[in-house]
Amino acid sequence: MLKTVTRAPDVRDPLAAALVAAAAMAWLFTGDFGKEVLSEVAVFAIFAMSLDLLVGCAGLVSLGHAAFFALGAYAVAAFGVFVNLPMWMAMPLAVAVTAVAAAAAGFFAVRLGGVFFIMMTLAIGQMVYAFFLNSRAFNADDGMAGIGRVDFSFLALDSGEPAVFSAFAVCAAVAVFLLLRMVARSPFGHTLAALRRNEPRLRSLGCPVLRCKLAAFTLAGALAGFAGALAAQHNGFISPDLAFWTVSGEVLVMVIVGGMGSLSGAALGAALVILLRHHLAGLTEFWVFYLGVLFVLMVLFAEGGVAGMLSRLPRKLHRRGGNV
Amino acid sequence: MFEARGLKKSYGALAVVRGVSLSVAAGERHGIIGPNGAGKTTFFNLLSGEAAADAGEVCMDGINLGKSPPDARARAGLGRSFQHNSLFAGLTVAENLAIAIAQRKKLYKIFWRGFLSRTEVFAEALDRAHRLGLGAQAHTRAAHLSHGAMRQLEIGLTLALRPKVLLLDEPTSGMSPEETAAIKNLIRRLPEELALLVIEHDMDVIFDLASHITVLDYGEVLMRGAPAEVRASPAVRARYLGMG
């Protein structure tokens, strides 16, 4: 019988379980600073997983994904600070706003293929950056501060506590992982994977490829907006830099280092890049340089990123065991 | 039931298809022959929507397909295979077929349930693999198939759409005599009501299968008729069959 249509079974789920276990350990055994880092990792894991739906599954390489991350952050700030809505309401509204924006941007972007799609997403990202940079309402390049967090007082918990917020962020990341895994395993997800492999053929088989790409782009954008809405609450501060193209590049590095086409790989990539940043930044000013070296090595020698390396590990161990 | 009227296509100053009309009835087996560069594949691309015609129209069951893209034409019942194999190389034979079946059933709309739970799709995929003569290779990746098996899968993917009109672009190109015989068999066993348009260079295959033949030359219809008439025509013999 068929096990899978697009991929061989691999370590993806054990990796996801290991990541959740690692997050639980970090939450239990680190101090406040460790929990702040854990929140950051969880937020970027959501951001990276949403991009993996585009890059790893559908083969659409976006260099403007940070636009939707920033839109989610600005929207949640606008609803929270200007309209004074509680975060429970501001967050879904921010996701909805981002979804609409992603659908509008995607309407133009998905018509283009290859490098033109990349250029279009880059342009859209920089347009969003330029808009917030010049927007008086959002304090232009000064950004906005004083963004609140979701209220857990009905559980007698204070979300200002790193322990509470990091647990919330990790739960959100797990929920997004489960949602995206469901999508990837569905007929729609398999259709996206077939689109990555051979778009003209899929089109000739009657698949409305533009609509499928637009649906993927919108979902990915909405989830990036969700990540942005969490980031705004975590930092309490937003600025136009959230939309800058280097942020899009950084999240793409997370996806590639972790392993394209693997959701838990993308989450692992987010964790690796953020932990490296925190550790290397303390040791050297040139941490971006060392991150670049790691990236080049991964692309050259580790097909499928860290997740790909891990998925080959059991076979290697097995072979070695057989030889002894 | 399927009709093309006055199709034209130029690439710059080069007129590749210069006003070709053609109509195919249900159940008809229509061969298209012509020398290299006669515009046969371009003509197919105009029919399937892969290329936009400069003039003319394509109708299916009396409905003008207008400028609709290839996927809309496929959903209207127009299936095509490609001259150069276009498969999902990393997937197995059964998986290739399952993807095609899923498109016919419009399953791409479903994002909340697992694909693998759709056992009827995979049962049909295996059944189709058997009927294509690829049963033993159902779990072989498309990239690892022989050329002949790839050609069979190429046609099988299109058939999985259950098209009303089937366009085959050189189904036996580059095949051994045994593989050619297998393809001929496959074409003979096509559903009777299906309208078939086939471009082919192997004259034995075309004269054997086709009920009607259109000869294209320099982007125009040189002649049209039953196989015997075409074979006997002095113009065709001189221009194409090389027996003048």
Image: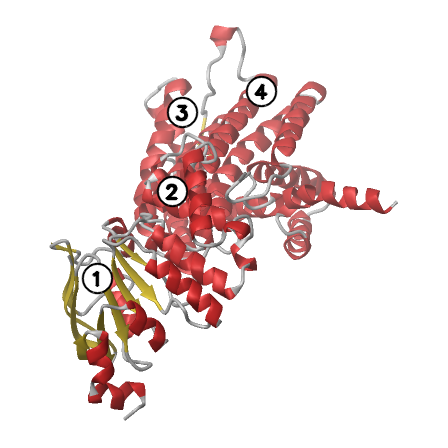
Read off the chain for label 1: B
Measuring from the top left, give residue A249's x and y in whole percent: 52, 49
Pointer 3 residue: A91
The residue that appears at 39% across and 61% down in the rendered structure is B185
Q: Helix or strand or loop: what does disc 3 sit on?
A: helix
- Mark 3 or mark 4: whose residue is earlier in sequence: 3
Q: Is residue A20 above or below residue B79?
A: above
- Density class for disc 4 (Cα within 10 Å; few <14, some 14-19, many ≥20) is some
- Density class for disc 3 (Cα within 10 Å; few <14, some 14-19, many ≥20) is many
Q: Are marks 3 and 1 in contact (CB under 8 Å)?
A: no
Q: Is residue A269 left or right of residue B86?
A: right
Pointer 4 residue: A167
The residue that appears at 67% across and 51% down in the rendered structure is A302
Q: Are marks 4 and 1 in contact (CB under 8 Å)?
A: no
Tag 3 and tag 4 share a subunit: yes
Q: Is residue B235 left or right of residue A117?
A: left
Measuring from the top left, give residue A211's x and y in whole percent: 31, 45
Q: Is residue A289 left or right of residue B49?
A: right
Tag 1 and tag 2 share a subunit: yes
- Density class for disc 1 (Cα within 10 Å; few <14, some 14-19, many ≥20) is some
Pointer 2 residue: B102
Which mark's residue is nearer the viewer, 3 or 2?
Answer: 2
Q: CA distance from mark 4 to mark 2?
A: 40 Å
Pointer 1 residue: B28
Kind of residue at disc 3:
Met
Kind of residue at disc 4:
Ala
Q: CA distance from mark 1 to mark 2?
A: 28 Å
Q: Is residue A163 above or below residue A44?
A: above
Q: Quadrant of residue A198?
A: bottom left
Q: CA distance from mark 3 to mark 2?
A: 36 Å
Read off the chain for label 4: A
